[in-house]
Amino acid sequence: MSDRRLQVFHTVAKLLSFTKAADMLHMTQPAVTFQVRQLEEQFDTRLFNRAHNRVTLTDAGKRAYKYTENIFEQYAEMENAIREITGDIRGSLIIGASTTVAEYMLPALLGDFKKKNPDVKIRLQVNNTEGIVSMIESNTIDLGVVEGTVSNKNLQVDICRKDQLVAIVPTNHPLSKRKKLSLKDIVQYPFICRETGSGTREVIAAKLKSAGLERQSVINTLELGSPESIKGAVEAGMGISILSEVSVSKELKLGTLVAIPLSPKIQRNFSFVRQRNRFRAPAMEELLEFARGYCE
């Protein structure tokens, strides 16, 4: 592997955070700081400005970062070119997934992929759709799997599958016997939604706006940060919600929630997102091919 100090510097420069770099590299923060200081001593110049709890690159640091980008890109190409000859699929991938995808779709997919490719190391980072797209844009992760719309035209977006959203209510709720519900029906009751940046929230907000119901929908609205917390709140009678159909299968089997189809239907895409022009390692290609088959 290339000089460890370069790897540490590159990670800090990418994240502009010693703490986040330490987490990503599985190192202590003092160890990360020590490696960067050694590199600064070697070049006899500062690579980072550290002031007011903010980390920025100096001019020398910016120049060094451009070179390390090329160094690690070339190293990856060399390593994978050699492994292509031997047919050996291995390496490390950092995948980012929005909450619904990470909790209800990826565990089985990645488990089956690892059985087929035991030498590929996978790290999973979970965030909402907005956060995952930001990680792709900054090259913090190799691949994102999201549930919302991606507006950045510089990113490659491949649809994996369609996802159906349904209304969920407690079993004793006045709406629980209905066969279908409209958004107008739903906004008459306290509503529980995901946080800003969530793909689920984005889709619902767009539909409410197109139906002219966005003002009414904010009345008695509770925001929660995950499908699991929303389901718990609905079960407790705190309100009703709209979630992915795949996220409520357990509760439907247990009889703790009722899912009701929406009219008109609300669908969104689960999509793979990645840098359009970034070199793709064989491990990435193998995962994408496997995932496409899995989604079908």
Image (cartoon, helix red, strand yellow):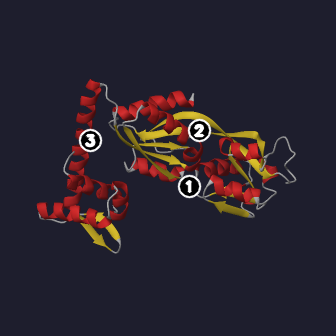
Residue underneath mark 1: 197
Q: Label 2 neighbourhood size at 10 Å, few (<14), some (14-19), many (20+)?
A: some
| Amino acid type of the residue that numbered disc 2 sits on in the rendered structure | Asn
Residue 269 shows which numbered tag?
A: 2
Residue 63 quadrant: bottom left
Front residue of 18 and 132 = 18
Front residue of 198 and 99 = 99
For the residues labelled 2 and 1, the Cα–Cα distance comes to: 16 Å
Callout 2–callout 3 Cβ contact below 8 Å? no
For the residues labelled 2 and 3, the Cα–Cα distance comes to: 31 Å
* Quarter of the rendering occupied by the N terminus: top left
Q: Position of residue 66 (x, y in %)?
A: 23, 50
Q: Label 1 neighbourhood size at 10 Å, few (<14), some (14-19), many (20+)?
A: some
| Amino acid type of the residue that numbered disc 1 sits on in the rendered structure | Gly
Q: Nearer the viewer, mark 1 or mark 3?
A: 3
Sequence-wise, the earlier of marks 2 and 1 is 1
Q: How many marks?
A: 3
**Residue 155 visible to the viewer:** no
For this view, does 2 lie left or right of residue 96?
A: left
| Amino acid type of the residue that numbered disc 3 sits on in the rendered structure | Glu
